[in-house]
Image: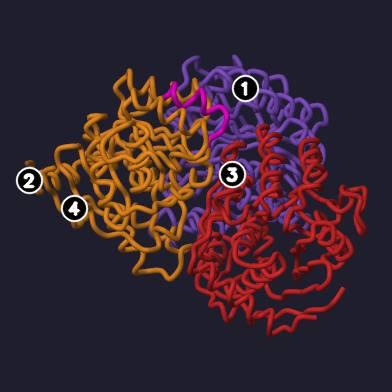
Chain colours: A red, B purple, C orange
Amino acid sequence: MVSKQEIQSKIRQTVEMVRRTNPIAGSITNSVTINFVANAQLAVGGSAAMVYLPDEAEFLAKAGGAMYVNMGTLLPIYEETLPYAAKVLHETGKPWVLDPVAVGIGSLRTQILQQFKEYKPTIIRGNASEIIALAGLWGLDGGTDESNVRGVDSTDSVSAAKTAAIALAKWTGGAVAVSGETDLITDGSIMAVSYGGSHFMEKITGAGCSLGGVVAVYATATSPFIAALTASALYNLAGKRAELKVDGPGSFQVQFLDELYKAKAEEIAGNSFDMEEV
Amino acid sequence: MVSKQEIQSKIRQTVEMVRRTNPIAGSITNSVTINFVANAQLAVGGSAAMVYLPDEAEFLAKAGGAMYVNMGTLLPIYEETLPYAAKVLHETGKPWVLDPVAVGIGSLRTQILQQFKEYKPTIIRGNASEIIALAGLWGLDGGTDESNVRGVDSTDSVSAAKTAAIALAKWTGGAVAVSGETDLITDGSIMAVSYGGSHFMEKITGAGCSLGGVVAVYATATSPFIAALTASALYNLAGKRAELKVDGPGSFQVQFLDELYKAKAEEIAGNSFDMEEV
Amino acid sequence: MVSKQEIQSKIRQTVEMVRRTNPIAGSITNSVTINFVANAQLAVGGSAAMVYLPDEAEFLAKAGGAMYVNMGTLLPIYEETLPYAAKVLHETGKPWVLDPVAVGIGSLRTQILQQFKEYKPTIIRGNASEIIALAGLWGLDGGTDESNVRGVDSTDSVSAAKTAAIALAKWTGGAVAVSGETDLITDGSIMAVSYGGSHFMEKITGAGCSLGGVVAVYATATSPFIAALTASALYNLAGKRAELKVDGPGSFQVQFLDELYKAKAEEIAGNSFDMEEV
């Protein structure tokens, strides 16, 4: 297994490369947290661009270094845009991050997520219930037929999603990040657990979505596993730091963006994590 | 008439029940303030989920404890989604909050608001001009044929909307909240006036919309009248407190979310209000 | 050439008139920064209203004092809404601000921007690459066939867009504002350069969009050139001031809105600028 030192060195390189090159990661994302996603992407040194239409998604998929696809607030046009974008991303080999928000709710979401199976999202990021439900939808190990997704919230623990996460990562050949009190990141052969964060991250919207957007930014510069781990480490660090300085969710959101911006590559790499083979 | 002490006791219970049970109130709402609505719902202890599509609205209407419907930035799909959601909510007896933003502007808005008459929104929240115009559209007392709605702003005083508010509440059998310098809340037989707030609430977007979203959260746990009064009391308290700590609308918005989160049940119940029979 | 003193006097009057009369400037704008645009418009004393549908756009175009049209995140309905709104604005002689975000990306954006040529947007605001690409699309001096627009970012310097800006202003008979490290504003015969701002304005989303929205607010009260210059002066002043008080992009955004609100008319008029004939 690769050593923690090697992983940390890659995290540092990823953070610095992004800050130096300002890579674009386009997004098709929900309207609730679209602003927070973009601002988080900018705060870490990336560039953001959001679209709704099929040909614009194609343009961004080809022009950007990676893409973020969030299933939050589906619009009718997404029936065309999302599978088409996924196809282009898959065919051009561009990394893309899927955030299967609210999987199991609504016929269009189910239909699109089924189509995504063959386009193999490079990184899948979700809460435990979403990861389990997506594995179920795709007929993989660790999934359940019935979704425990509660609106946009999880009712399962992160560790309960371990089998599903590994199965999804093996299917896509990429990485899976399960967000929760601790974050689990796996590429199907190794698994990292990232520690930190804040209870305020459940008291604001967009902690998860913007993490997905930042994973996409890092995916322009490194492997799926390192991208997901780097973003999780940064989020856990920034959440921990922001919490110490605020006493409510409004100021947490503001302080959190500041901490994303200020965190040094060394500090992100040094944020506590464990690794094991799976 | 019920005593102020009884009302205050119910306000306390509502605030505490929501913080304990984290109820979902789904929303179909405008894109300008959708993030602020969700964050306000989370700050008071609720859970948020926003949708655009008919079958997702149906799912949320059935799965959530209440729903918030805001007429702000209409999209074409709303022609299907909104009447369908209202029908489901009405038939399943789920409380829902209607925010008739910009009533009188555009043919789709008028058509949908007319359809809503029979689905009897449990709570109607708006500024004075919107309440008067909606009563007019529905042919009720206190309404006017001609809307004084100016974009999203009111040109009428809260007291001028009293007759319309009572007529609407009698029609729906629920409650009506008129937002302004003081807030008027009525269920058609009693009327409360809630005091406090801040001049900054007119200098930011979303004070009204997010109040509607929070009313929906509280409506999962109590009567329409108490839900509307609890939310108004909290907003007046949080506005007053936030104003003391800031000197501009940007920091007001942040501080206001913090105050929503920090306000104690006792303090919300203790926020100044008057009551009378109507 | 008009003297700097006269210009400064007009800036003062514009700022004060808007704060006194609270004019509505409606917007059709992207979903990423729609909230920031509205809050900026409110912070300077205007009133905001955002729409998607054709007849609502028509209503706002006629009812408001000016309109802001941002090409950011196009939706399918924009194919109808945008040309129709532009036509109504042109025919009624209402000032409108065009923000040609991401010009060159996607077929619908290109088609709509081509249609806009004959409707002559009163003020065009964009970054250097957008201004050059729009001049190219319209076959005017200083334009290039190939767009250097990179997602939503510019790869050209402000001074490189000078010829294109002048050509666009001559074509429309209005004004053009090129945003960058310094801002260039021209009506085709005189040119102002406005100084100030902050490096954080590139680290948040919406600095450009909200500037466009504020230009529209000022355009309800003065000439296109003065409206664009007033808004640019205010943004440069507020950016400079906000930067001194914060250490990250999250708090910059908050502080920036506060500074928009607090800046005195005299201070805005006194913000450093140069003028020359072209």
Horizontal side of A209 relative to C78 (left or right) equals right
Chain assignment, label 4: C
Amino acid carrying label 2: it is: Ser
Asked if the magenta segment contains residue B187, the reply would be no
Chain assignment, label 2: C
Q: Main secondary structure of the magenta part?
A: helix
* Residue C63 or residue B153, whichever sits in front: C63
Check if mark 1 and mark 4 are on a common chain.
no
Give the residue pinned by disc 4: C266
Give the residue pinned by disc 2: C3
Check if mark 3 and mark 1 are on a common chain.
yes
Question: Looking at the image, can residue B156 be seen?
Answer: no
Check if mark 2 and mark 3 are on a common chain.
no
Amino acid carrying label 4: it is: Glu
Give the residue pinned by disc 3: B34
Q: Residues within 10 Å of mark 2 (few under 14, many from 20)?
A: few
Q: Earlier in the sequence, mark 4 or mark 2?
A: 2
Q: Which mark is residue B113?
A: 1
Mark 4 → mark 2, Cα distance in angstroms:
17 Å
Mark 3 → mark 4, Cα distance in angstroms:
36 Å
Amino acid carrying label 1: it is: Leu
Q: Nearer the viewer, mark 2 or mark 1?
A: 2
